[in-house]
Image (cartoon, rainbow, N blue to C red):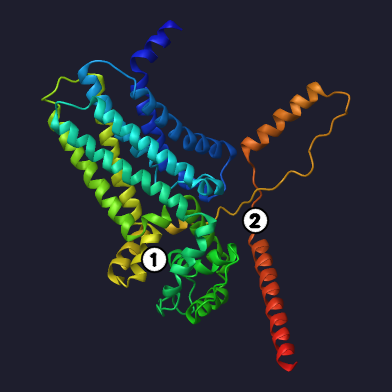
Amino acid sequence: MAGAVHLWNGWGVQILVLVSFMLQVFLLMFATMRRRNISTVARTLLWLAYLLADYIAVFILGHMSFYGKSHGHQQLLAFWAPFLLVHLGGQDNITAYSIEDSQLWPRHLLSFGAQTMGVAYVLYKYVAGSWTLLVAAVLIFVSGVLKYGERVWALKSSSLDNMSKFVDSRKSEAKRELHAQWGQGQKLDHEEVLQGAHYLLPICMAQLVDYKFWPSTFQSKAIELFDNKSQMFDLVEMQLSLMHDFLYTKASVVFTWYGCFIRAISSVATITAFFLFQSSIGKNDFNRVDAIVTYMLIAGAVLLEMTAALKAMGSTWTCALLHARRWHRLHNIVVSVRRCVKAAERNRRWSGSIGQPELLNSSHGSGDCVSAQGLAMGCKDLWKKLRHSLPVISDDTKKSVLEEVCRMVGAWNADSVSLCTRASLS
């Protein structure tokens, strides 16, 4: 026990800083799985990583404000502080774990202000002597402020209250006749279906928030096209995936001109800081372990930035943006690369399974044996939840559901026409 306490007192900050970085790597790699039905274990791990990423970063920043060791250690400790601000900015593929997180964006805004002032205080208190390290720390600080502010902005923009504003912004695009070449007669591939899902997304989003959005002539024809090709269910799967991106990721902010500007500034600042730190190694007497931790942090930050930039450039949202701006040559290049790696098929398709409530317990015991059998049944129910066996929805079920929806829509249209006819006659 004494050894563990001694280890924590000597290397606690280093351990937590690396844990904070590893949580960001974990979220970048696995947060996208939430688009599909995943097991309870996977959801729990993502939930813990999402919460711990914030808690650990805030704890370390508070600890740094009252931390004191050798002069060299203090300089590197101050250099670590802006990286925690970058970590608080989170990854592009997860900003909110639930809808309520977006509604609490003012709380994140307050935390953004408090943590930014905390990092600025640590830099003011400890960084001195080496101008190269100071400039590198300021660059990472700027990157952290931009990314954390972007996260708060994304939370505010992706709330249900602001969804109607997003739909309004797409009205001008809805009136354009884009003349997409979706083929004649043959079945569309996944990238073509995804392109249609993007173009028809405002209709889906408007229905979710009960907002009146009338399809353009081109959108109405596109809906008929997908219905005739029997790919309407595929279109809905893609749209639900895009809705997930809007509600739970930075998609509403990243794929804008200001989002691209933030990406460019953050990437340049991080790479420049890496070379500045490398040049300051020979001019300062840093602890070897602290220098290794710093190298891992800054090299990892560069790797995360480059990975996020590549993911953004190859994203379906980028394809939709290029198509809307009529940059068709660049759009075709990105789509061709996505087809080669089967991005739409692997990342955007529904898993085909759905959760269900357990209405009937499979085992029934007498009321007299409460303690032992209750504990056994509780463990059995927990094992079922962790195993998360989901029923698979067949193609016949999908077809039946779609036919019923079409019948309801047709009945509603018939009632609307009848009411309008009676009103005109009266």
On the question of residue 325 being in view, the answer is yes
| Quadrant placement of the C terminus | bottom right
Kindly identify the residue that appears in the image at 30 percent across and 51 percent down: 262
Spatial distance from mark 1 to mark 2, Cα to Cα? Answer: 30 Å
Q: Give the residue number, with chain letter if any, for mark 1.
A: 320
**Closer to the N terminus: mark 1 or mark 2?**
1
Q: Secondary structure at mark 2?
A: loop
Answer left or right for 281 relative to 252. Answer: left
Q: Amino acid at mark 2?
A: Ile
Which quadrant of the view contains residue 255? bottom left
Give the answer, above or below, for where 286 lies relative to 261.
Answer: above
Q: Give the residue number, with chain letter if any, for mark 2.
A: 393
Q: Secondary structure at mark 1?
A: helix
On the question of residue 294 being in view, the answer is no
Residue density around tag 2, few if under 14, some if 14–19, many if 20 or more, within 10 Å? few
Q: Position of residue 231 (x, y in %)?
A: 55, 69
388 or 153: which is nearer to us? 153
389 or 109: which is nearer to us? 109
The residue mark sitting in front, 1 or 2, is 1
Q: Amino acid at mark 1?
A: Ala
Answer left or right for 261 relative to 407. Answer: left
Which quadrant of the view contains residue 316? bottom left
Q: Position of residue 68 (x, y in %)?
A: 29, 17
Kindly identify the residue that appears in the image at 54 percent across and 69 percent down: 203
Kindly identify the residue that appears in the image at 64 percent across and 63 percent down: 398
Residue lying furthest top in this view?
2
